[in-house]
């Protein structure tokens, strides 16, 4: 039997673990090695300013085993916020043990408590059937939107550096 999971907001003291998790996720999901300095700066800026993103850590016996971030998107059609669930990572040996569910439920609990959040969204790699099945098992469904993007080269300004998301 596994030790119980807990979730908590990440702090600046968690920068190293978050950096490691994000590097591992980028390598695993996209085969990319992120620029460490850019990643650290991006994480530090978000940890200092919740308007940029809020991170949660999942821990088992006080040891981080996963993380997630959420950001906010205003919906003028609904007069409320969508929260985007992103930057999710679960240590390989902790997968299929409820870590993602714990993070997901913690974010949902916070979103519902706000009173002005109309839903939660996420994006997923098109080939990641396992993740898609997990999201659907939790009650999510595919949206009717297709995502497009245009990246700009790094500007050097706050938030302007882009490695990958």
Image: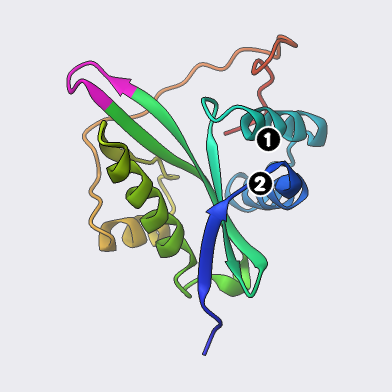
Give percent across and percent down for residue 119.
Answer: 26, 38
**Which numbered dot is residue 22?**
2
Closer to the camera, 118 or 87?
118
Q: In this view, does 18 lie to the left or right of 112?
A: right
Q: What element carries label 2?
A: helix
Residue contact between numbered discs 1 and 2, judged by CB atoms under 8 Å: yes
Q: In this view of the protein, can residue 88 be seen by the observer?
A: no
Queried whether the magenta region covers residue 21, the answer comes back as no
Q: Residue at x 45, y 57 (%)?
A: 103
Residue segment shown in magenta: 74-80
User: Dot 1: few (<14), some (14–19), or many (≥20) neighbours within 10 Å?
Assistant: many
Q: Is residue 88 above or below residue 147?
A: below
Q: In this view, does 109 lie above or below 71?
A: below
Give percent across and percent down for residue 33.
Answer: 74, 41
**Which numbered dot is residue 59?**
none
Give percent across and percent down for residue 20.
Answer: 73, 51
Q: In this view, does 134 lie to the left or right of 42?
A: left
User: Dot 2: few (<14), some (14–19), or many (≥20) neighbours within 10 Å?
Assistant: many
Give percent across and percent down for residue 100.
Answer: 45, 61
Q: In this view, does 39 lie above or below 161?
A: below
The C terminus: image quadrant: top right
């Amino acid at each position: 039997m596994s030790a119980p999971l807990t979730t908590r907001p990440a702090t600046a003291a968690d920068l190293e673990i978050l950096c490691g998790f994000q590097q591992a996720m980028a390598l695993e999901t996209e085969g990319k090695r992120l620029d460490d300095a850019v990643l650290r700066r991006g994480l530090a800026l978000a940890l200092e300013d919740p308007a940029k993103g809020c991170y949660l850590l999942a821990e088992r016996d006080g040891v981080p085993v996963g993380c997630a971030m959420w950001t906010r998107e205003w919906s003028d059609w609904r007069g409320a916020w969508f929260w985007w669930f992103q930057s999710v990572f679960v240590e390989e040996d902790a997968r299929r043990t409820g870590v993602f569910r714990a993070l997901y439920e913690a974010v949902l609990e916070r979103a519902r408590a706000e009173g002005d959040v109309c839903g939660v969204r996420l994006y997923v790699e098109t080939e990641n059937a396992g993740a898609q099945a997990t999201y659907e098992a939790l009650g999510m469904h595919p949206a009717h939107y297709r995502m497009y993007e245009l990246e700009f080269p790094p500007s050097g300004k706050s938030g302007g550096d882009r490695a990958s998301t």
